[in-house]
Amino acid sequence: MFIDTHAHLDSHKFDEDRGDVIRRAHESGVDAIMNIGFNRETIPTTLALAEQYPFIYAAVGWHPTDVEDMRLAEDLAWIERLCAHPKVLAIGEIGLDYHWDSPRELQHTVFREQIRLARRLRKPIVIHNRDAHEDVVRLLREEKAEEVGGIMHCFSGSWEIAKMCLDMNFDISFGGPVTFKNARVPKEVLSKVPMDRILIETDCPYLAPHPHRGRRNESAYVPLVAMSAAEIKGISLEEIGLQTSLNARARLSIP
């Protein structure tokens, strides 16, 4: 009934009970999970999870806060090879992060090269954007990212930025923050995004939804995000679960 379009179940925070966490997700009605491999350490562990569990799929890419550790040509070639894996459905998470001290020009270069790779491979992209809305939109436009489109992961921008992303063939994904009582902007954006362009996620183990805020997040909590989305849209939980699952399957080619 639900699809978690962004998870990090290979995180060390799940080392003691990963199997139980995945079981709870399945028991909570989560039919599929997109796990994200974003650097040299997490790409192999993400693929291992996707190979172990039929309902877990993978995205592989290079996170903007890890760009200084990237061997650009070598690692791009590695990602390209991995994209032939039948469980790898997207390139990501990629993008820009201006919150942490990661060199911006290098971030731009790595972001551009991964968009170009995605266009060459015809793979959708999963976008990480933290405090960099204008530059993310600009680079997506300049690199013609609308040719493959993708997902604006855990969207935190304004409705104006969301409209630009929608026009560039990107779906808008909402996570735990949309459940917070003071989350005025995310709730406003979700209310305006067309039903066929909304996705839901956890970003676990981060950004746990209410009432688990501040604790470890897990994929079993994605129905809580769906509940908030249903309330905002004025529809039933079943309707939002069905629609966001259809959207995710269409966007990511989930079987």
Image (cartoon, rainbow, N blue to C red):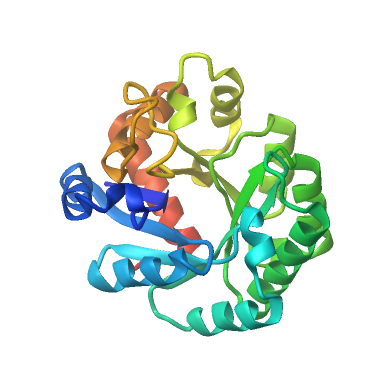
Is 93 displayed left or right of 49 in the figure? Answer: right
> Which residue is nearer to you in this view: 67 or 227?
67
x%, y% of residue 1? Answer: 26, 46
Is 112 displayed left or right of 180 in the figure? Answer: right
Residue 254 visible somewhere in the drawing = no
The number of discs equals 0
The answer to which quarter of the image holds residue 29 is top left
Is 185 displayed left or right of 246 in the figure? Answer: right
Please give the name of the residue rendered at 67% of the width and 54% of the height, measured from the top-left corner.
95
Tell me the quarter of the image containing the C terminus.
bottom left
x%, y% of residue 171? Answer: 57, 49
x%, y% of residue 158? Answer: 69, 30
> Which residue is nearer to you in this view: 12 or 84?
12
Please give the name of the residue rendered at 42% of the width and 81% of the height, measured from the top-left corner.
85
> Can you say whether 246 is above or below 120 in the image?
above
Residue 213 visible somewhere in the drawing = yes
x%, y% of residue 180? Answer: 46, 20
> Which residue is nearer to you in this view: 248 or 104?
104
The answer to which quarter of the image holds residue 126 is bottom right
Please give the name of the residue rendered at 78% of the width and 59% of the height, measured from the top-left corner.
108
Return the residue found at the far top: 182
> Can you say whether 48 is above or below 179 in the image?
below
